[in-house]
Amino acid sequence: MRVGIVTFPGSLDDRDAARAVRYAGGQAVPLWHGDEDLSGVDAVVLPGGFSYGDYLRCGAIARFAPVMAAVVDRARAGMPVLGICNGFQILCEAHLLPGALMRNDRQTFVCRDQALTVANATTAWTSGYQEGQRIVVPLKSGEGGYVAPEATLDALEGEGRVVVRYAGSNPNGSLRDIAGITSENGRVVGLMPHPEHAIDALTGPGTDGLGFFSSVLASAVSA
Amino acid sequence: MTDSVSTAAQTPDVEQPWAELGLKADEYATIREHLGRRPTSCELAMYSVMWSEHCSYKSSKVHLRQFGEKAPQTDALLVGIGENAGVVDVGDGYAVTFKVESHNHPSYVEPHQGAATGVGGIVRDILAMGARPIGVMDPLRFGPLDAPDTRRVLPGVVAGVGSYGNCLGLPNIGGEVVFDPSYAGNPLVNALCVGVMKHDDIQSSGATGVGNLVVLYGAKTGGDGIGGVSVLASETFTDSGPTKRPSVQVGDPFTEKLLIECTLELFRDDVVVAIQDLGGAGLSCATSEMASGGTGGMQVALDKVPLRDSTLAPEEILMSESQERMMAIVEPAKIEAFMAVCERWDVLATVLGEVTDTGRLVVTWHGETVVDVPPRTVAHEGPVYSRPYHRPGWQDALQADEPTPQRLARPTSPTDLRDTVLRMAAAPNLADKEWVTEQYDRFVLGNTVLAQPEDSGVLRIDEQTGLGVALSTDCNGRYAKLDPYEGARLALAESYRNVAAVGARPLAVTNCLNFGSPEDPEVMWQFAEATRGLADACLELGVPVTGGNVSFYNQTGDTAILPTPVVGVLGVIDDVTRRTPQAFTTPGQVVYLLGETRDEFGGSEWAHEVHQHLGGRPPRCDLDAERALGEILIHASRDGLVDAAHDLSDGGLAQALVESCLRGNIGVRVWVPDGLDPFVFLFSESQARAVVAVPRSEEVRFTDMCTARRFPHQRIGVLDDGDPDTGPVIDVQGQFAVALEQLRELRTRRLPDAMA
């Protein structure tokens, strides 16, 4: 399976996302923000970083990059898309996912090994987990507080579209402890924590994050 | 009207503001001598920044020479002192470059931007060597934790370091956070960067090849940081002076990130002849140093420099320290390819001129020549001072004030010892620094094997072979105050020990020498002693100095900071999966104390924290013992004889046990060896010591190794996960027990409470 990794100016975790795809057994395909087609990839990861410096609103400029038009089109047609951290912010700005990410309530950047609970183990990116499973994945962001109107939050919860929640103390003020959500069809997932940094106990807190990447590879095989 | 060279020749008697620009009368006279006329205002600007203390090392040069003269024999050094940063061979065709620099003065004036641009500057230095930057570290020093100004400076500095490094995508893997009253008003913000490349990729900064083009690329030039090096870094702060904020640069890490990727692509495509970053002294430095280091001549049209502020005068353009700029020398045949790479990364690039063989650096401004100088006189032949120095009159009295039991009351009862453990563990210098390090990304790039609070940061540089590097920075300024010669040696010893503790072989040294005013003979004595000590110690341990930085004038009024020679040691580890972490993890494993414990409390954390006392002699520095300990730790790591190791330094054994136990959330039963006073056992800061956790299956092999090497080793405890009801404890048998949860609570709350 070929998984595209988009590099925007200011993307930082693009190499890490590619490594995670490789560890899971997939082929990572670099995609450039200026590309207008997706080189025939089967899924796309929007990696973490500070696209365009994030001097406006995080992800607000990246959503207008040429590559995003193709990502949005294909996502609406069912292609799996994973947005990590800045990628999550971009997916919200591109309206593939509802809500927005705000400055952490503590006002400072936070980098830590974060415990999460998998709330939905049926999406293209989480099918390899069990619902209710506890995982530990690094969180590293300054603007990770998830917000949305009450009605949207109710709908997300009602439809089972909360994918992961912060377990233990809430690190950034996210409403209802939401760490990641999915689209109605369960193909687009955005989350603030970085599963690509939890694929090897040597360089991360463990291997709990690898499931995101192996899930999408498995979904392609079964589809 | 432009003050051109011809104007200058015709108007020799014009009054010039050399004093305001920080030049001394004899320095100004020397410039006139070099030129055979008065300098133009642009030339004056250029000389003033390049001859500043910060750029010219005029007060330190005569002492720094020792690092070269006493350099140990080594094959590891590919590029030595003098380039942007030294380059070390780490095997398998890889080379690593690393350097630490200060950004102390800007960070006091404007903590966030000062610290941020400190990171940016050192990253560009590493990039200019041809390397991909792969990590940063930040040794930081502040006034007392509870001082009002610390609440302004510390959060700003940490946010600045974090925002710049995080946005660049460089893992922050270590550093220091130290509090001492002497740093109030003079915080130390040092920044280290490490980069990796293949041997063939090493770049030079010499402008060679007549007719090759001089290209400026990166950010536009603005009015920020004008005179930063001469005004800020080369003068003592006074209480009543005007605000210096306009001299602090403003950073844009996004532009720097593009600059890094763009520059690495330029290297990959082999389209640059030479490269140099623009840091202190901006264009003045880049043009004069590149010309001086190359064919000898350069012609530059200053009016072509892209400006953020169109009203800037040519003098200001030459002095501006706007960030995120680089200068490259490019063959005319390759300029198109060069420009194409820059365009792909949206990086602005402008041809300013070309390399010549005239031996002159000529700068024009709208057709008029405003600079015409021999570049060596600007860049490499600045003033050199042998400043007077003498041992301070108070030094003997300070050393005589030994922290004997009669002078400083020691805890003796089990209750008092227990209280001391709790108090020390939560002391500002020993408390948990997570409040700081949580603001730094340590994961990005996916190669961080160990990061703070581990003894060293460890980065993997080859995913196939597991080859990696380890880095630590250390200095105990109190030791250096008691004895600057020994203090500098002890700083190296600690850093060396930290690198060995994780299982890496120490290879090379960088340093950031932070001192007060060199115009004070007593400060200058501290500097002379410290450099002599460090050079001697590097020779004895066989690790060469590859480069570094001097920061003088860290004083307010007559009060200088503690002499603070921060030493960074780089080590190599053949297989990062063999690294030794600090955490105790496995019940039943045996704890050994390596090294000899003596009654040594001069400059100790205990004397500082409990008695606010500084006096006596620092602990004995025995570099043979350090080397022997290092060998044991490295072999133990390679052969799998230990599962955890932690060096003993500030706070002694008690602190090391607290840290290793908390990190792995496991307790320890400890017994005090016969004949040793429990207080000395727990809190002495004797050097060349470490604690290790040994699996029982390896115990015989481990002790045999120590015995064969005749290195003192004592079995002092066993790891124990404790009673399920009380949780893990540190139990000093026959004395007291203290619960890890209580220690954790006290240690983690200390910084957040102070910053709240």
Image (cartoon, coloured by chain):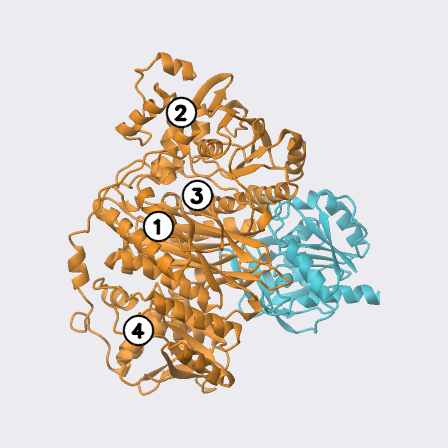
Q: Nearer the viewer, residue A143 or B162?
A: B162
Sequence-wise, the earlier of marks 3 and 1 is: 3
Residue, disc 2: B43
Amino acid type, residue under disc 1 in the picture: Leu
Sort mark 1 into few (<14), some (14-19) or many (20+) by Cα contacts within 10 Å.
Answer: many
Q: Mark 4 vs mark 3: same chain?
A: yes
In percent of the image, x 61 and y 44: which residue is there?
Answer: B264
Amino acid type, residue under disc 4 in the picture: Phe
Query: Which residue is situated farthest in the top direction here?
Result: B10
Sequence-wise, the earlier of marks 4 and 3 is: 3
Residue, disc 4: B683
Residue, disc 1: B513
Q: Secondary structure at mark 2?
A: helix
| Label at residue B82 | 3
Residue A60, given in percent of the width and then of the height, sits at 64, 45
Indicate left or right for B691 with B503 as reference.
left
Q: Mark 3 vs mark 1: same chain?
A: yes
Marks 4,3: beta carbons within 8 A: no
Sequence-wise, the earlier of marks 3 and 2 is: 2
Res. B399 in view: yes
State the quadrant of the C terminus of chain B.
Answer: bottom left
Sequence-wise, the earlier of marks 2 and 1 is: 2
Marks 3,2: beta carbons within 8 A: no
Above or below: residue B620 compared with residue B309: below
Q: Mark 1 vs mark 4: same chain?
A: yes
Disc 4: which chain?
B
Amino acid type, residue under disc 3 in the picture: Gly
